[in-house]
Image (tube, grey):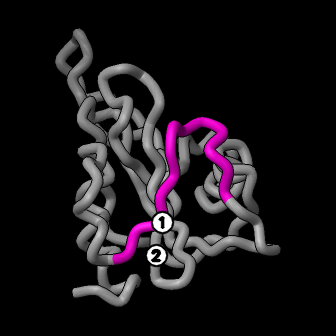
Amino acid sequence: MRTERANDGGQAERRALKVIVGAAIIRDGRVLACARSAPPEVAGMWEFPGGKVEPGEAETEALARECVEELAVRVQVGDRVGRNVRMAHGRSVLKVYAARLLHDDEPQALEHSELRWLTAGELDSVTWLPADAPIVAALRPLLGGN
């Protein structure tokens, strides 16, 4: 995905949007939500685990790597959930994928202050980061909710 902006000469210049991937890890009709511990302005808000796609890395590879780094779990990445979400600063796009845990791995809060497994009915019980909030509605059918 690319955006255009005018440079000093008034000509449009293209730059690639950074891709951020997130994992909607689903187990037994629940999705894993993670509370941010930092930075202070978003600490305590909830997100799907994930992070930046590095140059030369496939989105699914980045997501698997991020799950190991953030949660110490291995995942099988599945289909996309919801639409692309432009991040507030406009330089990145969030893409969320459904995922499932492998090998009976159990998530650990290595980079988050808290982890919760939420049912469809509990999705609104936490305050989601603005970028993650649009994904919540797309998740409900995957969790057996409306």
Where does the image place residue 61, in percent across and percent down from the top left?
Answer: 69, 57
Does 57 lie within the magenta span? no
Q: Taking 41 as reference, is 20 left or right?
A: right
Q: Which residue is mark 1?
A: 117
Residue 21: x, y in percent?
A: 50, 52
In the picture of the structure, the residue carrying the numbered disc 2 is 30
Q: Earlier in the sequence, mark 1 or mark 2?
A: 2
The stretch drawn in magenta includes residue 118: yes
Q: Classify residue 15 as left or right of residue 57.
A: left
Question: Bounds of the magenta span?
Answer: 107-119
Q: Is residue 123 above or below residue 64?
A: below
Residue in view at x 40 percent, y 49 percent:
47
Q: Position of residue 18 (x, y in %)?
A: 45, 39
**3D distance between C-alphas at marks 1 and 2:** 6 Å
Image quarter (top left, top right, bottom left or bottom right) of the C terminus: bottom left
| Residue 100, above or below 37 | below
Q: Is residue 7 left or right of residue 112?
A: left
* Residue 137 in the image: above or below residue 141: above
- In the image, taking residue 55 as reference, residue 122 lies left or right, namely left
- The reply to whether the C-beta atoms of the residues labelled 1 and 2 are less than 8 Å apart is yes
How many numbered marks, from 0 up? 2
Q: Is residue 86 visible?
A: no
The residue most toward the left is 10
Q: Is residue 142 visible?
A: yes
Residue 118 x, y percent position in the rendering: 40, 68
Q: Give the residue type that dot 2 points to.
A: Arg
Q: Secondary structure at mark 2?
A: strand
Q: Nearer the viewer, residue 34 or 96?
A: 34
